[in-house]
Image (spheres, rainbow, N blue to C red):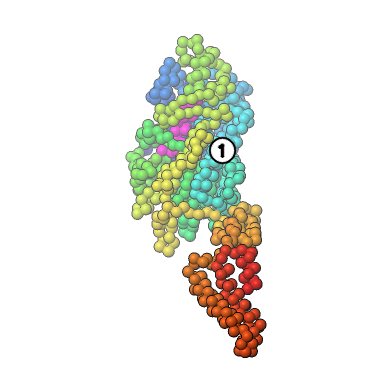
Amino acid sequence: MSNFRAPHSPTYDYIYIPGDIILGGFFPIHQPPSNELGSMQCTAIKRERGIQRLEAMLFALDVVNTRSSRLMSSVLAHSNIRFGALIYDSCDYESYAIERAFNMLLPSIDQCMPVTKRTESSVIAGVVGSASSIVSMAIADILRLAEIPQISYASTSTELSEKPRFQFFSRVVPPDTYQAEAVVSIIQFLNWTYVAVIKETGSYGERLTDDFKTKLKNKTICISGELSVNIKDTNTYARVIRELYEDEKYRFVVGVIIFAQEDSVRQILNQTASKTELNGRWVFLGTDGWGKKWYPVEDFGRAAINAITIAPKLYPIADFDEYFTKLIPSKNTRNPWFIEYWEETYKCKFDHSPKTIFNQNYTRLCSEVKFICFAFLDNYSAYTNLSVHYFQEGYVHYVVDAVFTLVIAIQKLIDEKCFNSSRHKPLCKEFYPFDGIRLLSILRNTTFRNDLSKRSIKFTPNGDGIGTYDIFQYQFIDLSKHTLNYRTIGEFSDNDQVNERVRIDLDTLKWFKYHHQHSKWLEESSVTPRSFCSESCRPGEIRTNTDSQQCCWTCRACELFHIAVNETLCLPCSERQIPNTNFTHCITLQAEYLSIKSVIAWPALILSSIGLLMTIYTITIFIRFSHTPVIKASSRELSYFLLFGICSCHLCAWPLVLKPHILTCFFIQIG
């Protein structure tokens, strides 16, 4: 058992590691303040998005200062510079982060000069962070005034690409423009035509929704409605799920797109999981705010079954796994929030740690003995109340990339400024005043390959990262054991030269259906769930739109002898034409007649021939004996006329079996 006193947030709200050059850092260690608490007090700790990413920066600094990677060993081969850090908890809340940003720059403000113009031995050369786009924007406005380059590991809003508003902002992740296109491509792949959108209020959700709607132009995909949630108002989540379930316009909607960060995603899944009748009702499609994170689905996994998510391509760092899984509170004293992380992870409490609303119900004393199960996509172990399943958070390598980018750019600036200096520690006088504008230029042109993540880093002229997206599905890895996890099913490339930008492996894409009668999940066939507004019309029917949506309609049958030339127009066939069986085009009526060769015609021709011969024979008798009293008494002239008519009737059988012609038709009419 550990008996040391645990430092606890918010008393300790920053980490300071001394060095010749200081890198600033902002990480969402805690969740934002709650409206219910009515204060600026941060709430529960973020184990993955906060602590893992924070430790990734500390890990990267260790690698830099010990030159323990091939890249850093090469870049810093002739340098004695030691890099330090000043890291703050942003609480994923812009107002809180702004206050911490001013604290970071406070010494320079006291001296009434930009921090980059100071001539002290330790300068804040650059800032790593933050995670959410809205917080990064708030920090960027302040850092721009101080001319301090900022590089984010997770902020993807397209708004951050706007220059010169965010002149000093760069990022190692691609912007949301590609995410929106990836979402549209996945929807097209699934053949969905009618979807609902849940967006989080703020820059991330609203701008991503706008990008999504822009990408939908000229596509046969409609949005049934946009539903907004607010992380500061938990009541909005229940309202949105209720509206999605009860409103008639969402009756046929299966695909629900979520443009939100992990906290909002968790709340959405929480509300969905609270109602058994909603099991399997929707297929959620999430962006990198959800990605491959465990926090959103923890305890609410059944609501996320079948969900498809995307995230910038993962490049796990094996050395970080070894580093992180060896951390224990008594040794990791440089991280003041690690005690809190430990208590929340193992649901325990240290002897002398401060009592909070989050650990007050923990009765078990914490131990520093670890019980960690590694959770991999195809090798998952269930965990008990004494163990925790761990896998590397998806953006860890981006944090390391951001730190390495700043270090390499700073070292290039040092080499440039201190070219004639024989040693770099202390920094040469020519290095001062620190030139943040020049550092930004060097940073934007920095390219390298991180040997830890095996990823190549480069930037666009606007400072955006370039990369591809992994596509995941949250599914049963073992249905019999109800084991759930993320599985990589494909990828999306933002390279314009790639013809098929979305590639999904159909063998890994699985669909599960909840059978309410038996209260269990069953694996379905490979048939993708449909998300539509109206059924396709039958042949010979056209669509009549019920509202402004092009995806919603009622079907109306075309009139007799009309065809459906497209989905909305009927046209009549010309004279001597009729519709084909599919009512797609008119066909000309072909003349059908009996042929002499037809077996059906033979009896008629034979009988008519016999009748004709008998009639001719009778006429012959009448002519031969025309002067006899019998013939004269039978009204000879009238009999000739009748016999001639009978001959015509017998002859009519022959034109009927010939190809129709004006003469044959005339003869038939006369006959």
| Above or below, 643 relative to 261 | below
On the question of residue 329 being in view, the answer is: yes
Whether the magenta-drawn stretch holds residue 393 is answered as yes
Measured along the vertical axis of the image, is residue 576 above or below residue 123? below
- In percent of the image, x 46 and y 10: which residue is there? 422
Quarter residue 560 falls in: bottom right
Image location of residue 258, percent across then percent down: 53, 47
Q: Which residues are magenta?
A: 392-406
Magenta region, mostly helix, strand or loop?
helix
Give the quarter of the figure containing the N terminus. Answer: top left
**Three-letter amino acid code at disc 1?**
Thr
Residue on which the image places disc 1 = 177
Pointer 1 local density, CA inside 10 Å: few below 14, some 14–19, many at least 20: many
Which one is in front, 332 or 31?
Answer: 31
Q: Is residue 606 magenta?
A: no
* Residue under the point 58% across and 36% down: 158
Using the rendered image of the protein, determine whether residue 106 is visible from the camera's viewpoint: no
- Quarter of the rendering occupied by the C terminus: bottom right
Residue sitting at 34 percent across and 44 percent down? 379
The x, y position of residue 291, in whole percent, is 47, 42
Task: Report x, y in % for residue 20.
Answer: 48, 20
Q: Which residue is more in the foreground, 445 or 572? A: 572
Secondary structure state at the residue bearing disc 1: helix
Q: Where on the picture, by quarter, is residue 163? A: top right
- 347 w.r.t. 572: above or below: above
> Residue 15's spot in the image, x, y percent?
48, 31
The residue closer to the viewer here, 388 or 615, is: 615
Q: Count all numbered tags in the image, as a single digit.
A: 1
| Residue under the image location 54 percent in, 41 percent down | 181
